[in-house]
Image: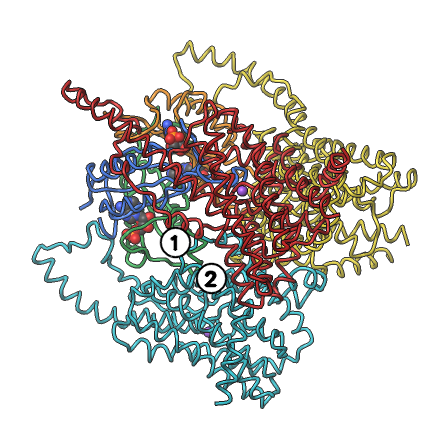
Chain colours: A orange, B blue, C green, D red, E cyan, F yellow
Amino acid sequence: MTQHASKLVIVTEKVLLKKIAKIIDEAGATGYTVVEAGGKGSRNVRSSGRPTVSDTYSNVKFEVLTPSREMAVKISDAVAAQFFDDYSGIAYLCDVMEVLHAHQF
Amino acid sequence: MTQHASKLVIVTEKVLLKKIAKIIDEAGATGYTVVEAGGKGSRNVRSSGRPTVSDTYSNVKFEVLTPSREMAVKISDAVAAQFFDDYSGIAYLCDVMEVLHAHQF
Amino acid sequence: MTQHASKLVIVTEKVLLKKIAKIIDEAGATGYTVVEAGGKGSRNVRSSGRPTVSDTYSNVKFEVLTPSREMAVKISDAVAAQFFDDYSGIAYLCDVMEVLHAHQF
Amino acid sequence: MDFLSDFLMRFLAQLQSPTLGFLIGGVVAASLGSRLAIPDAAYKFIVFMLLIKVGLTGGQEIRNANLVEMLLPAVFAVAMGILIVFIGRHTLCKLPNVKVEDGIATAGLFGAVSGSTFAAGLTLLEGQGIPYEAWTAALYPFMDIPALVTAIVLASIYTSNQRHKYFSKEEALSKQLVTAGDYPSDQSITAHGYPKSDLADRKVRIWPIVKESLQGSALSALLLGIALGLLTQPESVYESFFDPLFRGLLSVLMLVMGMEAAARLGELRKVAQWYTVYAVVAPLVHGLIAFGLGMIAHYLTGFSLGGVVVLAVIAASSSDISGPPTLRAGIPSANPSAYIGASTAIGTPVAIALGIPLYIAIAQALGG
Amino acid sequence: MDFLSDFLMRFLAQLQSPTLGFLIGGVVAASLGSRLAIPDAAYKFIVFMLLIKVGLTGGQEIRNANLVEMLLPAVFAVAMGILIVFIGRHTLCKLPNVKVEDGIATAGLFGAVSGSTFAAGLTLLEGQGIPYEAWTAALYPFMDIPALVTAIVLASIYTSNQRHKYFSKEEALSKQLVTAGDYPSDQSITAHGYPKSDLADRKVRIWPIVKESLQGSALSALLLGIALGLLTQPESVYESFFDPLFRGLLSVLMLVMGMEAAARLGELRKVAQWYTVYAVVAPLVHGLIAFGLGMIAHYLTGFSLGGVVVLAVIAASSSDISGPPTLRAGIPSANPSAYIGASTAIGTPVAIALGIPLYIAIAQALGG
Amino acid sequence: MDFLSDFLMRFLAQLQSPTLGFLIGGVVAASLGSRLAIPDAAYKFIVFMLLIKVGLTGGQEIRNANLVEMLLPAVFAVAMGILIVFIGRHTLCKLPNVKVEDGIATAGLFGAVSGSTFAAGLTLLEGQGIPYEAWTAALYPFMDIPALVTAIVLASIYTSNQRHKYFSKEEALSKQLVTAGDYPSDQSITAHGYPKSDLADRKVRIWPIVKESLQGSALSALLLGIALGLLTQPESVYESFFDPLFRGLLSVLMLVMGMEAAARLGELRKVAQWYTVYAVVAPLVHGLIAFGLGMIAHYLTGFSLGGVVVLAVIAASSSDISGPPTLRAGIPSANPSAYIGASTAIGTPVAIALGIPLYIAIAQALGG
Ligand SMILES: Nc1ncnc2c1ncn2[C@@H]1O[C@H](COP(=O)(O)O)[C@@H](O)[C@H]1O
Ligand SMILES: Nc1ncnc2c1ncn2[C@@H]1O[C@H](COP(=O)(O)O)[C@@H](O)[C@H]1O
Ligand SMILES: Nc1ncnc2c1ncn2[C@@H]1O[C@H](COP(=O)(O)O)[C@@H](O)[C@H]1O
Ligand code: NA
Ligand code: NA
Ligand code: NA
């Protein structure tokens, strides 16, 4: 009745917002959710000239529910291949026990 | 010593913020956390007249830790029944391994 | 090829942002992600004099991927010991199935 | 012919006014893919500033105004608000591919009032040196609230009629299903099809809708301004702050409205073409009807021609700030892409760029 | 009697000033459930603008000021800051249901200074045409910092005394428990009861508190303004920008303060009633004491009556921006709902709407 | 000697101008650890206001300008944009510890134009009463875009050469590995080392870079302002809003730039020291070369000395808003800490605080 799923989480630089959204769309995911995030990692590259004194949230965090692990890995691989050489970013996979209600999944 | 829990995640339109908070409260959850989120799904209904050119985060994401799967499903069912016919939204359940520290749980 | 990890989530008051970031750094985590969050719990202490009518997001939510459960618990214990007597806050642990791509983990 | 060429001349001249210039600039910039963005906080603050200024002006004026004079325009404003929704109910809603709830909500939004169109109207009037009663600011809620209330009530009546039909059918159906041991599958993961029997026979209560409107940020700011203008002595801040910043902030807001119109066009394309037709025609028609009513007040009680234009502008405008959330809550089953798209992408630009110059031109033709 | 009726007349007149009008408007709007909201970014920017403007005025003035003249008022400002906390320590903290830490923190907040109340005071003074020394802006930190430091030191002394008692008891107890094989259960999931032995004997270091205050956004903006006023020639931007926008931005800020006061009232209701009493009485009393001290300076060094009012307003005000975070860090065990609630919901409105008119009335009675 | 002492006098006097005062104030405040912050929304809105104002001024002026007069300065602007990148390519990129891509990107950023430095230049010119052609605003994109395009093209040529070498080596290597059954380990969890063969032989297309620049928020605002100034009659809002707020908003922006410079210094320390040297020297040198070119136009077509200063300032400035994202997308392998750090932490303060006074002093020496 409810459905098991994988949740792919990608945290990366804000400038990549649209490009990553496109990759997710094209991979056939039914949707994604994105929030502004700050963070620290091993790189901490900042891609925008916007003042750090006023803009503390320079990352975005994507969460994508995918029906299969494969689709998540596919998205993650595409993102990493295109961007993680040059941009800050991390991608990981969580388990979603059940998708309880969705308009399309 | 620590406690297993379920985490219910609900992503839906910002206009529903207060109404959903009320449902969560009334279901007896000890609390909730909410963040502003953008996103894309199958519907992408926008409920506010606020300019999209200035307001890119038109969703909210709720996270509710509940001691039992039942309470989470109860909240999710109530939210879906009341709103998901007419509003964008998704609800899913994750596992929390342990609640390490909380003022009340 | 990919790596299992724990995800520690800490939701607490915004004033503690820098202090908690420091604890996480010192515990040897490779990084963290933080978002602004609103929320309700058992305490709902507000620490800032900033108007509630204009500032509805007075919490921060940290997410820290750690290679081991121990490191997560260590961070969580340090945070709780130092702050949770006096400040609002919750800390819990999730499972990350796989860290797919990271610059350092 | 003379009137037409006169109108066209005025029209072209007005396109050069900063108000319309920024609106068109916004449309062009967004269409060309500009990433220009006015921060949300700035947008909200500007709207607040404009509405409180309009309110302050009105409030200060009401102090000296003859309350009897205000009566007839206020009655006409209420009448227009209700009338517009009924017009929409019997035109737009009857068109092919237009869902009735969507049509009613759209009509409600076009009946309601836009603070920014209103402010643009006042500025263009002043640009032409046409005097008007500043208390006309107070007419805003008199048209806005009745329109929203009427729309929500009409939609609710329609919905409960529908549900009645549906439930009588459904009941029979579900009995069959249950005996057949078949559980309705859309109860599972998809979010649709939840039983709503508790809602089926609800009564529409009007006061909550009115309250919702009055408590919204737009009407709150306007009414607060009116109250402060009426009860305090705001002259010092009015003259040093709210008034001088008015035109400039309005021009920035027009830019946002223009960009927004372009951005929403795509959304509108997803719904029936008839929304586009309605969104072009309705503002002009509503404005003209209101102009006619205003002329009655002009002859009966000496309502100024400028005031008549203001009434027409209020009628022509469609709500952009407080209307949508109120309708979303009041007619949840209506598709906001339809009504917000129609209003923002077409209705508002038409009302500002065609409607206002038209009404001013008519007033000048009548007046001079 | 004459003074009282005079005061009441003035008081009613001042309620019509935009400063108080917007404050009251905010209270009313929020109480009626309005969803009006000034965006956080606008609020912060307004506060910045006001404080930098006050600082610029002060800094430009200090250039020409006689430093000796400033000495006595500065000493009195420091004295008031410390005194207010001691008064609170021996009144509020002794009342039933008032936790000592909470009471000390509240007194600290009432000793500290509010930039917006300060700005409101200057505006109302100017509205009455009463001259004052613009360098009084520089008095702000002289009262603010000593008050916060004193509160944190007193709270720390109290806490370490308490801990001392607690630990002597605890030690005995825990030895018993361990022998009984009984592990204290609150070590588990609840977040309370962590051992804090390392904190028990800490010394309060004063410099970090002072630094924390000075680096806060409010004092930073004020001091930056003073420095720029003193060392550069800011006249061109001052006259074209900071000064003309001052009153208007202040009125918007007053609206926010009013809405905030109404919103925080509920929070205040959760703590002891005595906070309400303190929050009504304290600002008036503090202001009157400071007024008295100011009069000494008036007679000794010719400090203007307007300056005396400013000193009284600074004393009457309670901090709203930089104070709370400093206290939260300095006295973490105090309940912020108590002190922020008392200050924001009652202290500030009382200081602005009652205190300022009162001190002005007294000054006018004495002066004219 | 006389010129030098004259320059020093002027320089010290200009430090007291609010423009430089706020810049330095910001550096000092941030260095002292102040938590003062201008909200992001306010920052963005201020930048928008400044650029649209500069554009409006320029657009209104172009209406009356002789287009032929504009030709030579425009050509020089394009030449400077390209030249600056080539200078960087053959100086900075050759220095030890400077990665070639990083060096090219840095040169591109220094070739591009900063709206805030530009606005500061205009304000300081006006402060000295030196006239200039307002259409110089239109020179901005003529230098900005060629600089960014040249940098991206040069980097791309360099990278594909490198890749060519790398791939020839790699191919051989990977054949060996595969036969040895050894899978390259960095394919696993770390994000590096993905095969990019599809990118290896891509052509740099210039139009997308130009479009990207034009659509950026900074150039969009400027061009929108120019268009509105040219095609509409914006005088009423210009005089009541955009113009009077200009200096004040600029001073706030300078404060942000100052704080930002201090905050970014740390970032710069992580990269090669040579960036610091380049960032100090380059703005001055670029400005002087442009000054020289401008003098040619001065003698040939009567370009004013003020205009020459503007050209020098544009050349001396390094982009802060639209440049970085364009470069980040165009030269993704370059380290933004290097180029943003060099530009923001040192380049911009040097251009504003040393460059502008220097060019003004030269113009005055030549002119008077
Ligand atoms: N261990 C971690 N836990 C949570 N988030 C992380 C972790 N490491 C990196 N991140 C996030 O990923 C972003 C990019 O990381 P990096 O590429 O290592 O700079 C950081 O800014 C953080 O937001
Ligand atoms: N597959 C998905 N993964 C993550 N978030 C989703 C997904 N589908 C939908 N959402 C979120 O749920 C919201 C509503 O979805 P919908 O009702 O399908 O429009 C979207 O705006 C997204 O934020
Ligand atoms: N059951 C819960 N589920 C999700 N978030 C919670 C829960 N309880 C508390 N929180 C979050 O933790 C914060 C502090 O909680 P507390 O210390 O109980 O006031 C709240 O403001 C919420 O953001
Ligand atoms: Na209307
Ligand atoms: Na005080
Ligand atoms: Na340049």
Q: Is residue E152 left or right of residue F338?
A: left
Relative to A99, residue D240 above or below: below
Question: Could you confirm whether marks 2 and 1 are on the same chain?
Answer: no
Measuring from the top left, give residue B31's x and y in whole percent: 28, 48
Q: Which residue is mark 2?
A: E26
Measuring from the top left, give residue D204's x and y in whole percent: 34, 43
Relative to C12, residue D185 above or below: above
Residue type at mark 1?
Answer: Leu
- The residue nearer to you, when weighing E314 against A55, is E314
Residue type at mark 2?
Answer: Gly
Determine the secondary structure under disc 1: helix
Determine the secondary structure under disc 2: helix
Please report the residue visible at 51 percent of the width from the left and 77 percent of the height from the top. E11
Q: Which residue is mark 1?
A: C16
> To which quarter of the image does residue E180 belong?
bottom left
- The residue nearer to you, when weighing D88 against D109, is D88
Measuring from the top left, give residue E226's x and y in whole percent: 61, 67
Please report the residue visible at 56 percent of the width from the left and 14 percent of the height from the top. F168
